[in-house]
Image (cartoon, helix red, strand yellow):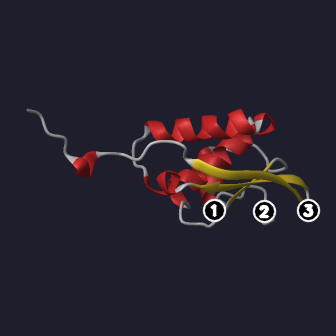
Amino acid sequence: MSTTDSSTTQPGPPYIGTLQWVPGRHGNDLILTPTTAGRTVTDQAAEAAAWNEVVRRAPTANTVSMQRQFDCHWRYARGKPTWNLELWRPTVSMDDVIAAYCNPGGPE
């Protein structure tokens, strides 16, 4: 008889709950609300799976800048109520995205 250690069980997808394009000051912004699983999962593969959920539902978001903004929120700002990803933001290194608190190119 085998047993499963429930302390290592990771929550599964979906990782993204709501996802909506809204008009912003510089164009349309993508506002995401992660699910509970999206806020708590620690499995490294979940980050890519969550981004794939975003791209599947909002193909226009599939840019390097948007993915880096998403990755920054996933890694460092999961507790924010919503994650705002903005198409107008410049493509910079991941280190620069992190240094800008996920908002490269200045405040909103």
Q: Which mark is residue 87?
A: none
Q: Which mark is residue 25?
A: 3
Q: How many marks overall?
A: 3
Which numbered disc flags the more N-terminal residue, 3 or 2?
3
Residue 75 picture location, percent across and down: 51, 53
Q: Is residue 96 visible?
A: no
Residue density around tag 2, few if under 14, some if 14–19, many if 20 or more, within 10 Å:
few
Q: Residue at x 78, y 52 (%)?
A: 20
Which amino acid type is shown beneath numbered disc 1? Answer: Tyr
Give the distance between the C-alpha atoms of the residues marked 1 and 2, in whole angstroms: 10 Å
Residue 63 falls in which quadrant of the image? top right
Give the distance between the C-alpha atoms of the residues marked 1 and 3, in whole angstroms: 19 Å
What residue did someone put label 2 on? 106
Residue 65 picture location, percent across and down: 73, 43
Which amino acid type is shown beneath numbered disc 3? Answer: Arg
What residue did someone put label 1 on? 101
Which numbered disc flags the more N-terminal residue, 1 or 2?
1
Looking at the image, residue 78 sits to the left or right of residue 43; the answer is right
Q: Quarter holding the C terminus?
A: bottom right
Q: Residue at x 19, y 45 (%)?
A: 5
Which amino acid type is shown beneath numbered disc 2? Answer: Gly
The answer to whether marks 3 and 2 mark residues whose Cβ atoms lie closer than 8 Å is no
Looking at the image, residue 78 sits to the left or right of residue 64; the answer is left
Identify the element where label 1 is drawn. loop
Q: Residue at x 61, y 39 (%)?
A: 51
